[in-house]
Image (cartoon, coloured by chain):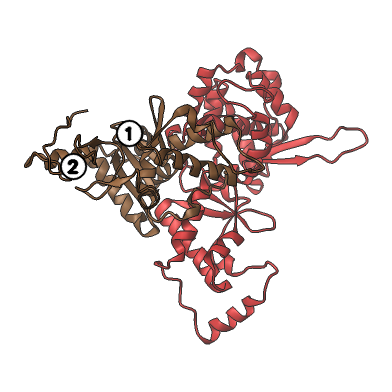
Chain colours: A red, B brown
């Protein structure tokens, strides 16, 4: 639970200052707001501002769906001029952090989208609803597999691996439910848990889809959580995965690990090292795995 | 303890309606993880929740314990105190799915007994020529979600209004379904099921009339002798 330090590698904290340094092309109100600050300083948005609960509740309503929130939607809810909008959104972010332990982090790329990250991971699967539990168990299995493969896998490799666990993404699973392919390829991608990229097509190869950890997974789930989950999934001692842990830490923080030997970068060949008998996941075992989510 | 309070609040928002058993299941590993003493027993849990509620009141949110008259069970409900008409406009729901919520609410609240047969929750639903009405499977899925989050309650073959609807939509129910949903004349809160006077048919909360009859023996509405049995 402790090692969440790397989690902010790609996501950035949206502090009030960053919001003010809005580099999006837009109306030239920024200049006029700047002039306003110089002549008559704008009062800070009151914490009792009536717009704040509306923005805050809007964010809270979007948390369960895990879909990124657009900054423009929050600004629209806030109303007022640019300066007021920025101050209100910044005030809401402070309140979310103080009272709910929720941080808003800006996603990389254009369009100013935000994801909500809790200040501590869940302690048990009981914090999730009945519907969420199988979904997150499957997500952890997928993230674990990708983690073991140096954070990039082809979708076919993943589906083959899931097949070894008796999970056919094209069929309804008695524990994980139906539409698993859609859940993996669309929902997890929209929620930013998975990144799905098409490999460049060459004249010698078929088009391939690659999956890797998305920004939400990086910000929300620590390597230690994944190692603890892997130990249960593969029925091994956590120390068995030391090599993967070191490799992942090295990938996350390359400067600190420049002097390592190349042999340490090898990954465990999951297809080869584990057989169907090792991985076949019964419904009971799948539901037991959800206890490891915390 | 602050981290535990915040994590518990997040779990309450996620579930929206929690039984005491679930509260205990959430708090035990949570307090262990953060190495703090777990609030034990009803009173300690209630004061722990009250402390959290103080921090969210200003954002028009509440955490309240309510005993549901139909299930007889206590629930901790997270709800909004100023629900606006788009309150159910969840980012995961389409306009038709939101409409389904309103239709279902209408069906249950317009019924004299404020209940609806389970299978009627999917049949005879008019989406007013909508291009994309939700399929039956999706309606079942949604209803299950709304039951889990406390908007509706399932008991036997019937669907009732759930603890969250009673608290969050009190004003809406009082205003729009005044024919079927009345307020208890003793406590002024909504009364949907509970107990009826055998003479004038007025609905009252079982607990309210029980207290009232400690000192009197007549119905507070018609003033005739109270004859309905108080125990369930």
Residue B159 is situated, as x and y percent measured from the top left of the image, at: 41, 32
Read off the residue under disc 2: B208
Q: Can residue B41 be seen in this view?
A: no
Image side of residue B209 versus residue A55, left or right: left
Q: Can residue B184 be seen in this view?
A: yes
Read off the residue under disc 1: B24
* For marks 1 and 2 on the same chain, the one whose residue lies earlier in the sequence: 1
From this view, report whether residue B110 is shown above or below residue A170: below
Other residues around mark 2 within 10 Å, as few (<14) / some (14–19) / many (≥20): some
Which residue sits at x=54%, y=40%? A222
| Residue situated furthest bottom in the rendering | A39
Q: Which of marks 1 and 2 is in front?
A: 2
In the picture, residue B20 is in which quadrant?
top left
Residue A172 is situated, as x and y percent measured from the top left of the image, at: 63, 23
Q: For this rendering, which residue is in front, B127 or B48?
A: B127
In the picture, residue B16 is in which quadrant?
top left
Q: Distance between the residues labelled 1 and 2?
A: 29 Å
Circle 1 sits in a helix, a strand or a loop, which is it?
Answer: helix
Circle 2 sits in a helix, a strand or a loop, which is it?
Answer: helix
> Label 2 marks which chain's residue?
B
Residue B189 is situated, as x and y percent measured from the top left of the image, at: 27, 48
| Residue situated furthest right in the rendering | A203
């Amino acid at each position: 639970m402790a090692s969440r330090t790397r989690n902010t590698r790609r996501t950035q904290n949206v502090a009030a200052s960053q919001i003010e340094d809005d580099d999006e092309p837009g109306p030239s109100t920024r200049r006029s707001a700047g002039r306003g600050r110089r002549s008559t300083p704008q009062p800070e948005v009151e914490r009792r501002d009536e717009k704040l609960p509306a923005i805050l509740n809007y964010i809270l309503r979007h948390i369960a769906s895990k879909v990124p929130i657009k900054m423009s939607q929050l600004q629209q809810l806030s109303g007022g001029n640019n300066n007021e909008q920025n101050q209100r959104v910044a005030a809401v972010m402070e309140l979310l952090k103080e009272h709910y332990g929720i941080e808003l982090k800006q996603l990389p790329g254009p369009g100013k989208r935000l994801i909500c990250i809790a200040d501590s991971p869940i302690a048990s699967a009981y914090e999730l609803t009945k519907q969420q539990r199988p979904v997150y168990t499957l997500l952890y299995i997928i993230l674990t597999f990708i983690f073991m493969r140096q954070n990039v896998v082809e979708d076919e490799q993943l589906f083959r691996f899931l097949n070894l666990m008796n999970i056919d993404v094209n069929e309804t699973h008695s524990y994980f439910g139906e539409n698993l392919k859609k859940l993996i390829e669309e929902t997890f991608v929209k929620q930013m848990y998975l990144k799905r990229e098409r490999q460049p097509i060459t004249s010698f190869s078929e088009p391939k889809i690659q999956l890797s950890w998305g920004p939400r997974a990086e910000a929300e789930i620590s390597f230690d959580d994944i190692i603890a989950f892997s130990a249960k999934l593969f029925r091994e001692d956590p120390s068995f995965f030391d090599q993967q842990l070191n490799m992942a830490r090295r990938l996350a923080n390359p400067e600190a690990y420049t002097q390592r030997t190349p042999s340490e970068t090898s990954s465990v060949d999951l297809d080869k090292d584990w057989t169907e008998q090792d991985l076949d996941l019964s419904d009971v075992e799948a539901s037991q795995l959800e206890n490891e989510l915390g | 303890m602050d981290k535990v309070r915040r994590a518990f609040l997040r779990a309450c928002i996620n579930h929206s309606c929690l039984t005491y058993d679930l509260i205990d299941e959430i708090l035990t590993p949570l307090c262990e993880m953060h190495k703090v003493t777990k609030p034990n027993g009803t009173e300690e849990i209630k004061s722990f929740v009250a402390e959290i509620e103080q921090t969210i009141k200003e954002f028009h949110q509440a955490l309240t314990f309510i005993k549901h008259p139909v299930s007889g069970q206590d629930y901790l409900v997270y709800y909004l105190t100023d629900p606006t008409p788009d309150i159910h406009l969840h980012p995961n729901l389409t306009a038709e799915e939101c409409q389904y919520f309103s239709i279902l609410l209408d069906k249950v609240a317009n019924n004299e007994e404020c209940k609806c047969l389970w299978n009627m929750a999917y049949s005879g639903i008019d989406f007013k020529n909508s291009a994309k009405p939700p399929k039956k499977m999706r309606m079942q899925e949604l209803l299950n979600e709304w039951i889990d989050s406390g908007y509706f309650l399932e008991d036997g073959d019937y669907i009732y209004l759930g603890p969250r609807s009673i608290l969050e939509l009190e004003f809406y129910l009082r205003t729009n379904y005044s024919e079927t949903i009345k307020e208890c004349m003793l406590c002024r809160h909504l009364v949907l099921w509970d107990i009826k006077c055998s003479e004038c048919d007025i609905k009252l909360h079982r607990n309210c009339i029980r207290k009232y009859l400690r000192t009197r023996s007549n119905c507070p509405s018609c003033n005739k002798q109270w004859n309905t049995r108080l125990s369930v």
